[in-house]
Image: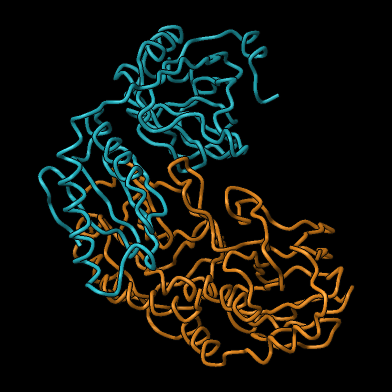
């Protein structure tokens, strides 16, 4: 199933997911529109919807084939009717309310102890490490996606002066809390894991906690601005102790 | 009811139907690789649909039952023995206190399931007993819900309720020798012309280092018409990702929630248990199907469990 409804593309992915997509680019107005659609679908509490995952320019509805669809009509027809009605209703109502965005000021220690790639980026870009830190901290980033791993936070957009490709070969181990950059994106690693981003610092904040009342610190649509802290301040704030 | 892991297998864990509702936070669904065999085991024991099962690979864990209970083994046939006496698959088995279950040889399939007769079991984390990284450890003791009295009477009742038609239906589906059915995905249109032909006509097989996160495939190298440069979006169970190297990877139960590689398509959900049971190196082919067929087959199969 694939249709165009105004600026939207709606298509099936596999046999149990439906995607609502806008133009394929990293753009805050696109993200905000998807976030509103996400909240709109959530509020309807539709039987059989298992997950709604917003990421960059797509919103994916994962559904349970047993409860979301019925035997009475062809699956493609049902999905077509569902998505057309949903988007029509959404477009009529979407202008009404805009929720406030949460801005987090996130401490990052850019000490060489944690900033494994900062010196090399400085050499490659011919910019001092101090200047890179200043540029990285100067922007209010939008959270475009949470995922891959529990709580991994994808943010954009990184200033072009410090944009750098990810490593050709990922590091075997990146420490939880590490802050990295890759192209337009900056991100935070939630756990110790392999990773290919260029590591420029570490936050003392625990951004994913298995406690069911906590889980991921950020959600898609939140805003993040980093500020530089010393090693001493990092130790005082360290939530990984 | 508790069990003790006397020897740990290569990748055994507690699983169930998985966890949904948390993927927007990056939390994986997890759950059984061969959901139909697991549902069959729980159906035979008249357990709740969400009852946890033991998922075994080969070499398998050796399991000691610390109390009398009733179990049912389904899925792959690894030649199960209890205290060195062979036992049957797909039937209720009365197990005495301190008896030990071992698996001798991987005759058929790649994943076996053990259900344990139980009442309601509280989910350990976020509505599920399945989670990444819950591999068994040697000497670990795992508790299931409360011990049932009158186990021998119950075992007889369960035997009398066996449904041979359902058992045959699950076995036929999960071990059927036929191509794996796929639906084209968003990046299908970006495949080079000869790549589509290769994908649906040449044989593939699963690499041995594959795990519950994903199966890497051995087969013809595939290429895209455009550079592999996609914004990350949600992936699901069965997604076929094309790596920049030209190799394919199929995402399985412990899959990541979003992915940035080319999403070529999806193995249909009804065929995923069969794919999960395929041994590394075993050649197979992909064949295209359509959404209606995929959904009808799945709904029809699921309905036979009466959950």
**Placement of A195 over or under A127, stated as above or below:** below
Q: Is residue B303 visible?
A: yes
Residue lying farthest right? B98
Residue B221 falls in which quadrant of the image? bottom left
Please indicate whether residue A139 sits to the left or right of residue B87 in the image: left
| Front in this rendered view, residue B37 or A93 | A93
Please indicate whether residue B17 sits to the left or right of residue A1 in the image: right
Residue found at x 48% / y 69%: B206
Q: Is residue B75 visible?
A: no
Residue found at x 46% / y 27%: A198
Residue B266: give x, y in percent of width and height: 35, 64
**Placement of B87 over or under B224, stated as above or below:** below
Residue B151: give x, y in percent of width and height: 80, 80
Residue found at x 22% / y 64%: A78
Please indicate whether residue B150 sits to the left or right of residue B115 in the image: right
Residue B264: give x, y in percent of width and height: 30, 59
The N terminus of chain B sits in image quarter: bottom right
Please indicate whether residue A220 sits to the left or right of residue B200 in the image: right
Residue B161: give x, y in percent of width and height: 63, 89
Chain the render paints orange:
B
**Placement of A133 over or under B79, stated as above or below:** above
Residue found at x 57% / y 52%: B127
**Placement of B275 over or under A120, stated as above or below:** below
Chain the render paints cyan:
A
Residue A184 falls in which quadrant of the image? top left
| Front in this rendered view, residue B49 or B197 | B49
| Front in this rendered view, residue B237 or A65 | A65
All told, the count of numbered labels is 0
Is the image coloured rainbow, by chain, by secondary structure, or in one colour?
Answer: by chain
Residue A236 falls in which quadrant of the image? top right
């Amino acid at each position: 199933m694939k249709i165009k409804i105004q600026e939207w593309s709606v298509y099936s992915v596999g046999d149990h997911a439906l995607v609502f997509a806008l133009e394929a680019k990293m753009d805050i107005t696109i993200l905000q529109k998807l976030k509103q659609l996400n909240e709109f679908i959530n509020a309807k509490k539709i039987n059989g919807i298992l997950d709604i995952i917003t990421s960059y320019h797509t919103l994916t509805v994962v559904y349970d084939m047993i409860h979301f669809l019925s035997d009475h009509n062809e699956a493609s027809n049902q999905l077509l009717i569902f998505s057309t009605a949903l988007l029509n209703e959404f477009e009529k109502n979407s202008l009404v309310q805009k929720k406030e965005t949460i801005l987090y000021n996130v401490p990052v220690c850019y000490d060489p102890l944690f900033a494994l790639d900062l010196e090399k980026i400085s050499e490659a870009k011919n910019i001092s490490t101090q200047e890179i830190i200043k540029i990285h901290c100067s922007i209010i980033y939008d959270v475009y996606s949470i995922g891959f791993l529990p709580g991994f936070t994808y943010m954009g957009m990184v200033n072009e002066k410090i944009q750098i490709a990810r490593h050709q070969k990922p590091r075997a181990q990146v420490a939880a809390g590490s802050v990295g950059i890759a192209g337009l994106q900056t991100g935070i690693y939630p756990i110790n894991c392999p990773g290919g981003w260029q590591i420029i610092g570490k936050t003392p904040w625990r951004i994913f906690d298995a406690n069911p009342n906590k889980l991921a610190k950020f959600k898609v649509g939140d805003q993040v601005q980093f500020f530089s802290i010393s090693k001493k301040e990092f130790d005082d704030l360290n939530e990984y102790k | 009811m508790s069990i003790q892991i006397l020897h740990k297998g290569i990748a055994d864990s507690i699983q169930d139907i998985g966890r949904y509702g948390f993927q927007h936070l990056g939390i994986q669904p997890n759950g059984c690789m061969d959901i139909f065999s697991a549902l069959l085991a729980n159906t035979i024991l008249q357990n709740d649909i969400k009852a946890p099962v033991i998922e075994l690979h080969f070499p398998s864990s050796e399991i000691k039952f610390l109390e009398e209970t009733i179990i049912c083994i389904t899925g792959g046939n690894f030649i199960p023995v209890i205290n060195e006496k062979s036992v049957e698959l797909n039937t209720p088995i009365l197990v005495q206190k301190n008896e030990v279950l071992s698996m001798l040889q991987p005759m058929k399939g790649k994943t076996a399931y053990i259900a344990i007769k139980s009442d309601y079991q509280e989910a350990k984390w976020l509505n599920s007993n399945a989670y990444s990284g819950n591999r068994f450890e040697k000497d670990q003791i795992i508790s299931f819900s409360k011990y049932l009295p009158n186990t021998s009477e119950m075992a007889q009742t369960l035997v009398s309720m066996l449904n041979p038609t359902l058992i045959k239906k699950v076995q036929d589906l999960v071990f059927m020798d036929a191509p794996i059915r796929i639906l084209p995905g968003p990046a299908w249109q970006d495949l080079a012309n000869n790549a589509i032909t290769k994908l649906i006509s040449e044989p593939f097989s699963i690499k041995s280092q594959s795990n519950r996160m994903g199966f890497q495939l051995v087969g013809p190298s595939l290429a895209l018409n455009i550079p592999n440069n996609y914004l990350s979006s949600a992936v699901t169970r069965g997604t076929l990702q094309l790596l920049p190297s030209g190799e394919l990877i199929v995402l399985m139960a412990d899959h990541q929630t979003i992915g940035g590689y080319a999403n070529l398509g999806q193995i249909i959900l009804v065929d995923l248990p069969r794919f999960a049971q395929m041994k590394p190196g075993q050649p197979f082919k992909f064949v295209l199907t359509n959404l209606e067929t995929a959904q009808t087959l799945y709904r029809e199969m699921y309905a036979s469990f009466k959950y």
